[in-house]
Image (cartoon, grey):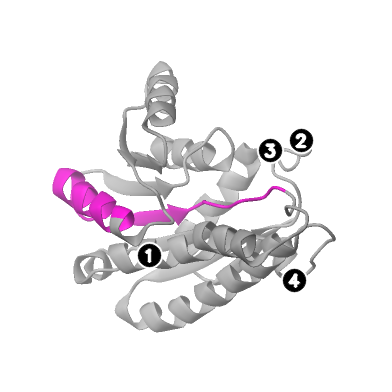
Amino acid sequence: MDKKTIVVVGAGQGLGNHVAEKFAKENFRVVLVARRSEALAEYQKEFATKGIEVGTVACDATDAESVKAAFEKIHAEVGTPDVLVYNVGITTPDAQPLDEQEVLRHFKADVLGAFSCIKAVATDEFAEKKGAILLTGGVAAVSPFPGYTCLAIDKAALRGLTLAVHKELEPKGIFVGTVMVCGIIGGNEHFAPANIAEKFWQMYQERKEWEVRFE
């Protein structure tokens, strides 16, 4: 039986690559997507040392045309994916003073990019494969903290997007869900990326609740 394919948009040393590794260990083919080709080449080497072969595609998630081109390449090279994980997010403190341009910069990465990726992946073929779309949420969506206004706005918007698209795509057989991370990823042993990655795998397997909390 041919392997299923997971596309991880927002690959990186933290959560993105750990989600990819978890799914790879469950016999998934992995495609890593990130902005910088140089970083992707390093990730590819690191996965190879673990005996995991991964494909890579460079893409700027804030650019709709870049996202479209990236998924066209993915479809051409490996076919229709089975899982999309959107893990792009700017989690740094707000610039001071915070202005409209900075709010928009965050929003493009944190929310608009997710919308573009969902639009690109949610084809009829993806529905036929009972595809799943999993997004990295954060507790700032419901419990903002000072100095992170952009993060609060965007995680709330991403949460709303997840629910809206979940309701829209569920009748077609596509599952859409978000893992709300209720702490700092890697901030302590409990919030280690590998532990959170297990929650993504659990959500994919169960396909029940549109939102689960990792706390």
Residue on which the image places disc 4 = 142
Q: Quadrant of the C terminus?
A: bottom right
Mark found first going from the N terminus, 3 or 4: 4
Horizontal and vertical percent for residue 8?
Answer: 42, 47
**Residue 114, quarter of the rendered image:** bottom left
Q: Nearer the viewer, mark 2 or mark 1?
A: 1
Which of these two is toward me, 5 or 156? 156
Residue type, mark 1 in image: Ser
Note whether 153 is above or below 53 in the view shown: below
Query: Mark 3 or mark 4, which is nearer to you?
Result: 4
The amino acid type, in three-letter code, at marker 4 is Val
* Residue 67 in magenta stretch: yes
- Which numbered disc, 2 or 4, marks the residue that appears first in the sequence? 4
Residue 116 is marked as 1
Residue at position x 42%, y 68% from top?
115
Cα separation, mark 1 vs mark 3, equals 28 Å
| Residue depicted at x 47% and y 46% | 10
Residue 189: mark in rendering: 2
Vertical side of 203 occupied by 160: above or below: below
On the image, the x and y values in percent for residue 101 come to 60, 62
Q: Secondary structure at mark 3?
A: loop
Visible in this render: residue 81? no
Identify the mark nearer the N-term, 1 or 3: 1
Q: Is residue 192 left or right of residue 167?
A: right
Q: Is residue 179 magenta?
A: no
Q: Secondary structure at mark 4?
A: loop
